Image (cartoon, rainbow, N blue to C red):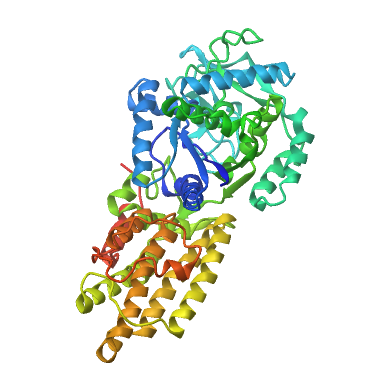
């Protein structure tokens, strides 16, 4: 039994995420976690809400709530939606936890001891009206590049140009609207990433099996221009992990917190500690190589925008601590999922958001489409036409139709129990050979986290059952050789639990329905396909399930297309 530590990039707290966020981290991580559990391995699947930083404060202010209260409410909202999508986290934590505060401060002390933190005095925009320094996102103005009037201090959302607050024309405070701003000196802690450049470079070079998307982004940050830069890890904010605390080997950091991108990845460790504190488990055996984590395989899932922090900044924290923490073994990164000719946009409310998706259709419909179209090698695009076609053809016509046809046929001719009589022949032998070959290919793709190929192979396994049923035609054979029809039906009914087990990582609710219909709780992985197809004997009772997947009508598709074309309320 292997041990798998799996983390997905932690979603930001400021609102409900869209389907592009879901397929970029949490959903493929869940697929991999479910698969490894199904194979009998020990899994620790961790996620959390990312609750610090400027956007949390802004979202709370917009909602008219204290930031701590807002984060508590939104954490539960996101946790409930995650449950709705059947994301099988062992723990869904919070980066505002006591555990994360202590671990973040611990790592900062260790980095300081190693000589990897330095104090930097720099000039930053100060609002006299608000009586505070303004982080980049607290400042808006007109973009000097394109003239967009709501550009932020770090970037223009219209033309995507990277900015500094001093670049903006007519800058103003997002908090008060005041234009009474001036540059003042402020002191911050910087992580000396540049001192670890060669070590990080060698580490990235050693990961020869990583996706090109992951390593190319890391290499770009390491070598482009002046190479890897030192990075500020504190901010002038009130909400976050305090940068001045008892035991800190520095002074003068009162009123500052650690930068959200410093403490957020540490929450992976802290969330596991939260799990341990809740369950009595041992979190260090997952994270400390001197306490059992040396046999753990650690896999991270994330969108490409998160890659620099997980390949460089977070590893710099781990390596720089000089403590025996577990480093990631594999980073599965994803490109972007676009929406119907444009982009999903949280800020503009464009596209389908996770809560809305679950209002329209059950989780499995979305899980199947998103995973089978995962943006692995390039950006992919959600269109309503493609979604409708995939649901109707793959789920309804192939899998759902197979389950419906064979259960209804058997019930009508033999009753609601697997029929006796008949022997297997050449058709059955050929089917077993094909399913064995395809099952091994499916396993290979799942182990390699090749998600689209895994989905295609699973669909081919479903298709094989339909083709067998069509070719063997038990409804015709029954008229002349009922024993032969019974043998066909018995094998085909045994295909249902086999399909359920193989399909669980993708469509867990439908898998439960299939196992329920066949009145079995056996979820053992079908290593021997022939044995699996005799697991339920003649006389074993079954029921005819409700429709597994309904088809999406053209009228529905058009309605949804119109509904989600504009701004979210």
x%, y% of residue 323? 68, 25
Residue 51 at least partly seen? no
Residue 16, by quadrant, is top left
Residue furthest out toward the bottom: 480
Q: Is residue 299 above or below residue 180?
A: below
Q: Foreground: 228 or 449?
A: 449
Give how far across and how far down residue 548 sits, in percent: 29, 63
Name above or below for residue 425 compared with residue 86: below
The image quadrant where one finds the C terminus is top left
Q: Residue at x 20, y 77 (%)?
A: 412
Left or right of residue 553: residue 498:
right
Left or right: 515 in relation to 246 = left
Q: Is residue 462 left or right of residue 139?
A: left
Vertical relation: 172 (above or below) 84: above
Residue 109 quadrant: top right
Tell me which residue sits at (64%, 30%) in the image. Answer: 325
The percent coordinates of residue 35 (x first, y second) are 49, 52
Q: Nearer the viewer, residue 385 or 125?
A: 385
Residue 231 percent across, percent down from the top left:
67, 27
Q: Which picture quadrant has residue 391? A: bottom left
Query: Which residue occupies 52% across, 70% down?
Result: 436
Q: Is residue 327 visible?
A: yes
């Amino acid at each position: 039994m292997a041990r798998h530590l799996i983390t997905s990039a932690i979603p930001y707290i400021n609102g409900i995420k869209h389907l592009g966020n879901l397929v970029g981290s949490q959903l493929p991580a869940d697929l991999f976690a479910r698969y490894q559990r199904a194979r009998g391995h020990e899994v620790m699947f961790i996620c959390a809400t990312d609750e610090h930083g400027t956007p949390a404060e802004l979202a709370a202010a917009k909602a008219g709530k204290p930031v701590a209260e807002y984060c508590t409410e939104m954490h539960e909202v996101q946790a409930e939606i995650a449950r709705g999508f059947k994301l099988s986290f062992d723990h869904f934590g919070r980066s505002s936890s006591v555990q994360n505060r202590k671990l973040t401060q611990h790592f900062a002390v260790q980095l300081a001891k190693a000589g990897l933190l330095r104090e930097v005095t720099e000039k930053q925009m100060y609002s006299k009206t608000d009586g505070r320094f303004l982080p980049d996102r607290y400042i808006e103005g007109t973009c000097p590049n394109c003239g967009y009037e709501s550009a932020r201090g770090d970037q223009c959302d219209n033309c995507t140009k990277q900015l500094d607050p001093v670049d903006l024309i007519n800058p103003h405070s997002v908090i008060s609207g005041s234009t009474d701003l001036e540059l003042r000196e402020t002191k911050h802690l910087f992580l000396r990433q540049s001192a670890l450049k060669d070590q990080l470079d060698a580490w990235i070079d050693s990961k020869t099996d990583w996706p090109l998307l992951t390593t190319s982004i890391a290499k770009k940050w390491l070598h482009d221009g002046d190479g890897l830069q030192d990075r500020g890890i504190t901010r002038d904010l009130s909400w976050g992990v305090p940068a001045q605390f008892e035991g800190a080997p520095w002074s003068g950091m009162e009123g500052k917190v650690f930068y959200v991108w410093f403490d957020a990845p540490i929450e992976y460790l802290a969330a596991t500690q939260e799990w341990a504190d809740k369950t009595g488990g041992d979190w260090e055996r997952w994270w400390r190589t001197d306490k059992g984590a040396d046999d753990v395989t650690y896999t991270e899932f994330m969108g490409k925008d998160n890659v620099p922090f997980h390949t460089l900044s977070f590893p710099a924290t781990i390596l720089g601590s000089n403590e025996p923490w577990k480093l990631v073994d594999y980073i599965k990164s994803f490109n972007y999922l676009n929406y119907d000719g444009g982009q999903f946009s949280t800020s503009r409310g464009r596209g389908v958001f996770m809560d809305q998706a679950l209002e329209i259709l059950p989780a499995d419909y979305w899980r199947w489409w998103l995973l089978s179209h995962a943006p692995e090698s390039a950006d992919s695009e959600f269109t309503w036409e493609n979604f409708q076609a995939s649901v109707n053809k793959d789920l309804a016509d192939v899998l759902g139709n197979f389950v419906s046809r064979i259960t209804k046929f058997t019930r009508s001719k033999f009753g609601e129990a697997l029929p006796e009589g008949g022997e297997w022949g050449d058709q059955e032998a050929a089917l077993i050979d094909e399913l064995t070959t395809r099952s091994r290919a499916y396993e290979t793709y799942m182990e390699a986290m090749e998600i689209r190929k895994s989905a295609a192979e699973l669909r081919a396994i479903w298709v094989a059952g339909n083709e067998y049923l069509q070719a063997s035609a038990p409804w015709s054979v029954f008229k002349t050789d009922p024993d032969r029809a019974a043998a066909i039906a018995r094998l085909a009914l045994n295909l249902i639990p086999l399909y359920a087990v193989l399909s669980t990582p993708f469509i867990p609710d439908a898998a439960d329905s299939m196992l329920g219909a066949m009145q079995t709780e056996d979820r053992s992985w079908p290593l021997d396909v022939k044995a699996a197809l005799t697991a339920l004997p003649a006389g074993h009772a079954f029921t005819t399930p409700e429709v597994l997947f309904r088809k999406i009508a053209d009228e529905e598709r058009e309605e949804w297309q119109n509904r989600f074309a504009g701004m979210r309320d």
